[in-house]
Image (spheres, rainbow, N blue to C red):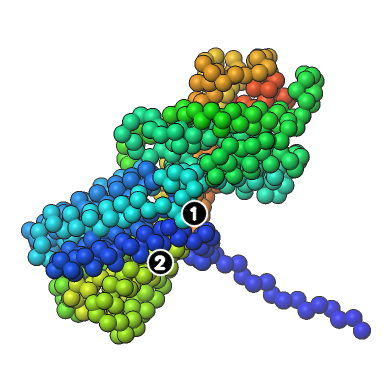
């Protein structure tokens, strides 16, 4: 007897704002950062205790803790800016907060903190380092105003800087495990450049498959990471050692390989499996700081114009062969890269435009409201002594600063993770405080939490839990009573405050941060397209459209002179186009995971990003094909027109960004 299957009701889909709260980054454990974390905050606190200046030791440990949150993989030179700029901003905030808290009453103090929030919020829109600096400025200002102490403000600021500086010294001095075979000063840069070659190989392997688009995005992320790792601050305008010059040359050699791999991905036709062997060998050579050895033979014959024009995949494969040969020469010579390839073109005018643009104004207003309202509520509750007799009221405004930051994820996800992490951390500390000896147990707990921070940064709730335990241990080490219950209450108040402010109407259009990033991506795509298909002196062709077919360029190119400068310019423009697109994609993804009342303000922006990506991919394929044949195929022209037409249709539908216009 046949039985009909029992139909089961479909499970309701998890809303994006809730699903995002459960996402975590999956990365290898950064053991070197774990070691630095263990040696930073705990020893800083212990040093203060041994010197009889426990309050300053607490501030040094807080500086080391905040620096540990910013201690991410990358080059040592880059870490000077990534850790040093936010630490300097934090010390300035602590100085201002201390003197403002000592000399102002509640209302003027709240106005000063609100003004600081407005400035720091606008500056945070400039970039990741500026965002970290704005965060530390406000958190340290809240600590300075809300944690009274007998020490003068300049001593507190120096103690904060000393803690962060100690972690930076560890970052610069300690080698990465397993890196002693080469010059360990550049182990982070070597790993980043090797990751680019691995990403190129992975993209070539995925060409024609379902994962090709994801691998192309991963290649962009690897290039961004390597570019950041190599672009740290320097005293001289050129590489100071042979090891650094080799790394610069090897990064530059990866750019034509990435370009060819992107063109292969655009063509969408499978390529020989051995095409990925060359980039893999180059990746191994970068990691070992050795020569690449023999590379695979060319994949295709180089004769016959008819064969060259048979399919778009053939010029891209030849470009891959050419780039491999050039890479082998660069690995042997070890010459430095063009400086324009190593850093971003971020002028002061562009930074000001980001800070005072729609995104910066919207973010600045929300930060100012959250931080100022948090400070006012905290002071009122402090004077009412509703949560105990301790003299600290900084937790609520400092929590609001972290919650209002859009680069930490969607608002609802941040609120859920912060609440859950604080409750978990407070409960864990309450249990440990009853068992650990004092003060040795508290110092050990601070050291353990410092070691856990690099791992906990994978998820905001985990990071919140670890930081909560660490800060509560510091408070108790400073002589205050156990404050877990009060911290939970203040955190929940901050969550409610940020949810309310996050939904308040603001002057101008909502979603300004997303639109600013899309505008930057549109402008970068426009500049890249004009360089490849623009007038003479700005790229390959005398024009775009059908006129590009008539322009025949030299069959081969040489690395040197004006042609070298033109290619360096093209690769720099291509890097900026893909990088700004990746930033826009991240902002759009966060906005789409907001609550529906907020997500609706950025509906349709993902379609703009997809159209811009298709345009930039097609422009890359056009550049590679023009290098090989000097003319574009009907397929290239059709795809260009389709991408430009889609952008124009989106513009007519009300998406206001600077879209590239066909000539």
Q: Position of residue 301 (x, y in %)?
A: 78, 25
Q: Residues within 10 Å of mark 2 (few under 14, many from 20)?
A: many
- Viewer-side residue, 446 vs 662: 446
The C terminus: image quadrant: top right
Label 1 vs 2, first from the N-terminus: 1
Q: Is 273 situated left or right of 412 in this image?
A: right
Q: Secondary structure at mark 1?
A: loop
Q: Which residue sits furthest front?
A: 181
217 vs 42: above or below = above
The N terminus: image quadrant: bottom right
Measuring 47% from the left and 29% from the top, which residue is drawn there? Answer: 336
Of badges 1 and 2, nearer the viewer stands: 1
Q: Residues within 10 Å of mark 1 (few under 14, many from 20)?
A: few
Measuring 61% from the left and 34% from the top, which residue is drawn there? Answer: 257
Q: Position of residue 191 (x, y in %)?
A: 51, 47
639 vs 364: above or below = above
Measuring 84% from the left and 78% from the top, which residue is drawn there? Answer: 4
- Viewer-side residue, 391 vs 562: 562
Mark 1 sits on what residue? 178
Measuring 50% from the left and 21% from the top, which residue is drawn there? Answer: 565
Q: Is 191 situated left or right of 421 in this image?
A: right
Q: Position of residue 556 (x, y in %)?
A: 66, 18
504 vs 260: above or below = below
Mark 2 sits on what residue? 452
Mark 1–mark 2 distance (CA, rounded to whole Å)? 21 Å
Q: Is residue 433 visible?
A: yes
Q: Residue 429 appears in which quarter of the rendering?
A: bottom left
């Amino acid at each position: 007897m046949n039985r009909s299957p029992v139909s089961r009701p479909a499970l309701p889909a998890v809303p994006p704002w809730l699903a995002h709260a459960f996402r975590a980054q999956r990365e290898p454990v950064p053991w070197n950062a774990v070691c630095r974390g263990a040696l930073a905050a705990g020893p800083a606190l212990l040093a203060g205790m041994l010197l009889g200046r426990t309050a300053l030791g607490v501030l040094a440990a807080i500086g080391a803790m905040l620096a540990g949150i910013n201690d991410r993989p990358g080059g040592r030179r880059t870490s000077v800016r990534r850790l040093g700029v936010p630490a300097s901003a934090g010390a300035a905030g602590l100085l201002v907060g201390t003197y403002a808290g000592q000399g102002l009453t509640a209302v003027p103090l709240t106005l000063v903190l609100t003004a600081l929030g407005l400035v720091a919020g606008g500056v945070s829109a400039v970039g990741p380092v500026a965002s970290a600096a704005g965060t530390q400025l406000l958190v340290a200002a809240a600590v300075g105003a809300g944690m009274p102490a007998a020490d003068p403000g300049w001593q507190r600021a120096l103690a904060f800087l000393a803690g962060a500086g100690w972690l930076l010294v560890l970052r610069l001095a300690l080698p990465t495990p397993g890196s002693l075979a080469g010059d360990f000063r550049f182990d982070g840069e070597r790993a980043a450049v090797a990751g680019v070659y691995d990403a190129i190989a992975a993209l070539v392997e995925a060409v024609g498959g379902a994962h090709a688009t994801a691998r192309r995005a991963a290649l962009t992320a690897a290039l961004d990471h390597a570019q950041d790792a190599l672009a740290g601050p320097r005293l001289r305008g050129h590489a100071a050692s042979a090891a650094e010059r080799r790394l610069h040359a090897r990064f530059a050699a990866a750019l034509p390989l990435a370009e060819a791999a992107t063109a292969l991905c655009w063509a969408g036709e499978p390529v020989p499996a051995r095409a990925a062997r060359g980039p893999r060998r180059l990746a191994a050579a970068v990691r070992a700081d050795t020569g690449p050895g023999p590379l695979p033979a060319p994949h295709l014959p180089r004769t016959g114009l008819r064969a060259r024009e048979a399919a778009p995949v053939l010029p891209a494969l030849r470009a891959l062969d050419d780039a491999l040969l050039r890479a082998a020469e660069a690995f042997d010579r070890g010459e430095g890269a063009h400086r324009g390839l190593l850093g971003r073109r971020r002028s002061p005018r562009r930074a000001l435009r980001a800070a005072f643009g729609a995104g910066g104004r919207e973010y600045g207003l929300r930060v100012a409201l959250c931080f100022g309202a948090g400070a006012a509520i905290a002071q009122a509750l402090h004077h009412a002594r509703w949560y105990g007799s301790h003299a600290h009221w900084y937790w609520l405004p400092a929590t609001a600063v972290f919650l209002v930051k859009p680069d930490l994820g969607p608002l609802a996800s941040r609120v859920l993770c912060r609440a859950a992490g604080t409750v978990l951390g407070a409960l864990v500390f309450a249990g440990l405080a009853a068992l650990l000896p004092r003060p040795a147990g508290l110092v050990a707990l601070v050291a353990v939490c410092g070691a856990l921070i690099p791992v906990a940064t994978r998820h905001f709730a985990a990071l919140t839990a670890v930081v909560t335990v660490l800060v509560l241990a510091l408070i108790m080490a400073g002589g205050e009573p156990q404050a877990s219950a009060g911290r939970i209450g203040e955190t929940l108040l901050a969550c409610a405050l940020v949810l309310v402010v996050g939904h308040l109407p603001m002057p101008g259009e909502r979603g300004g941060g997303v639109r600013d990033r899309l505008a930057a991506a549109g402008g970068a795509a426009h500049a890249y397209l004009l360089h490849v298909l623009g007038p003479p002196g700005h790229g390959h062709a005398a024009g775009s459209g059908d006129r590009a077919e008539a322009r025949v360029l030299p069959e081969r190119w040489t690395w040197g002179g004006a042609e070298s400068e033109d290619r360096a310019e093209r690769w720099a423009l291509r890097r900026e186009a893909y990088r700004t697109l990746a930033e826009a994609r991240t902002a759009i993804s966060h906005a789409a995971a907001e609550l529906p009342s907020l997500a609706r303000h950025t509906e349709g922006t993902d379609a703009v990003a997809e159209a811009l990506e298709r345009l930039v991919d097609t422009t890359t394929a056009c550049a590679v094909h023009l290098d090989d044949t000097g003319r574009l195929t009907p397929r290239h022209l059709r795809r260009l027109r389709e991408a430009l037409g889609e952008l124009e249709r989106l513009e007519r539908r009300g998406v206001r960004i600077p879209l590239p216009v066909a000539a």
